[in-house]
Image (cartoon, helix red, strand yellow):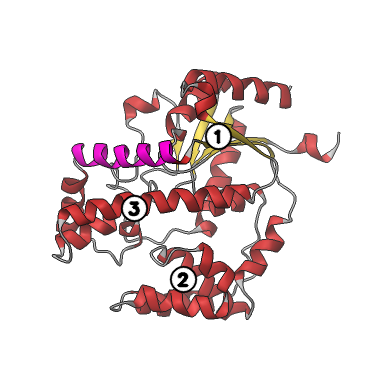
Amino acid sequence: MDSEQKKKPLLIIGGPTGVGKTALSVELARRLSGECISADSVQVYKGLDIGSAKASPAEMQGILHHLIDILEPTEHYDAVRFQQMAGKAAAEIHARKHLPILVGGTGFYIQALLYGIDFSEEPEERQRELRQQLEAEAGEPDGALRLHARLSRIDPESAEKIHPHNIRRVLRALEYYELHQRPISMHNAEERAREAVYDAAFFVLTDERERLYARIDQRVERMLSEGLLAETEGLYARGFRSTDPGMQGIGYRELLLFLEGKCSLPDAVEAIKRHSRNYAKRQLSWFRRERAVSWIDISKFDYEKDRIAGWITDKCMKKWA
C-alpha cells in the first residue's frame, strides 16, 4: 500500500463569505455519510450566531457539526488551537467510518490542518508573555493600527495580506517575528511546500465578483433583519467589548462602535458590507495560492445546490473508490 492510500480522506469546501458553503456542506454530508468541521474563526464562539452565519439546528438537518459554540467570546482562538481541535474531530469522525468535511473561509486554518503545520517549536512561556504584551498594546487607542504599521516595517508581505482589523493575525505575525527573528511570511511559504497529511478533495466555490458582492450586501441586510443588532446589544450588555477575541468578527466590531456612540447605525451597516466584501476578496486571493484545488463557479450550475453537490459527490466517489 503506498503512502497516499494510507492517508485518511478529507473533503474541504472553501470559498469566500456568502457564497453558500454551509448549505452545500450539509447536502454533501447527507450524500457522503459525512460530518462537518467548521473552519471559521467566529462560529466557534457561543452567542455569536447571526453575525457568524451559523447554521440553525433545522439547517443542520441532523448532520453533526464540530467546532461550533464551544468557546466564550473572551477566549483566544487561533490556527494552533484550531488545528488541535479539528484534528481530534477528524480522527473521531474517521473512527465512526464517516467522512470529515472541513467547511469555511479561513484559509490559514484549513492549511494548518491539511498540511499538519508544525507550531510546536515556539517556547510556550515566552509566547504567552509576548501575546499578553501585544494584546495590551492592541487594546490602546489606535493600537491595532500601530501594530499593523509595525508589521509593515518588519514583514511587508504579511502586512499587505493581513487587514489591520484582523487583530488575531497581526498579533500572530508579530509574535512569530519576535520569537524567531524571521518573518512569518517566510515560514508560511515553507509550510505551504509541505505534503498534505490527508488524502484531500479540495473544492473552492466562487462567483462573478459583482454577483458575489451583491449576495454579501443582501446577506448583511438579512442578518440585520434577523436581529444582528439585538444580538450585539445582548453581548454588549453582558460585558463583552471589541478587545475580546470573539467580538472582533465582522458585523460585531462595527455595531459595537455604534453602541459606543462612535458612529451612526447607517455608517456601521455600510462598514459591515464594505469589510465583508474586502474580506471575500482576501479569501479568494488566499485560495488562489493553494495547490490541488478544484474551483467551482456556482453560476455555471445555475446556483443550484443539488447540482453542485452531485458534481462534487461524483468527483469524491471516483477519487476514493
Which of the 4 quarters of the picture holds residue 147?
A: bottom left
Q: Which residue is mark 2?
A: 171
Q: CA distance from mark 2 to mark 3?
A: 23 Å
Looking at the picture, which amino acid does disc 1 mark?
Ile
For numbered disc 3, what is the local secondary structure? helix
- The residue identified by callout 1 is 101
Q: Is residue 4 magenta?
A: no
Q: Nearer the viewer, residue 110 or 296?
A: 296
211 is within the stretch colored magenta: yes
Would you name the residue on which mark 3 appears?
Answer: 274
Reading the chain from its start, which is encountered first: label 2 or label 3?
A: 2
Q: How many marks?
A: 3
Residue count near mark 3 (Cα–Cα under 10 Å), binned few <14, some 14–19, many ≥20: some
Q: Sequence-wise, which precedes: disc 1 or disc 2?
A: 1
Q: Residue at x 47, y 34 (%)?
A: 21
Q: Give coordinates of residue 58: x percent, y percent.
A: 32, 25
Residue at image point 37% right, 50% down: 276
| Span highlighted in magenta in the image | 210-225
User: Which residue is painted at 73% across and 54% down in the image?
Assistant: 194
Res. 124 in view:
no
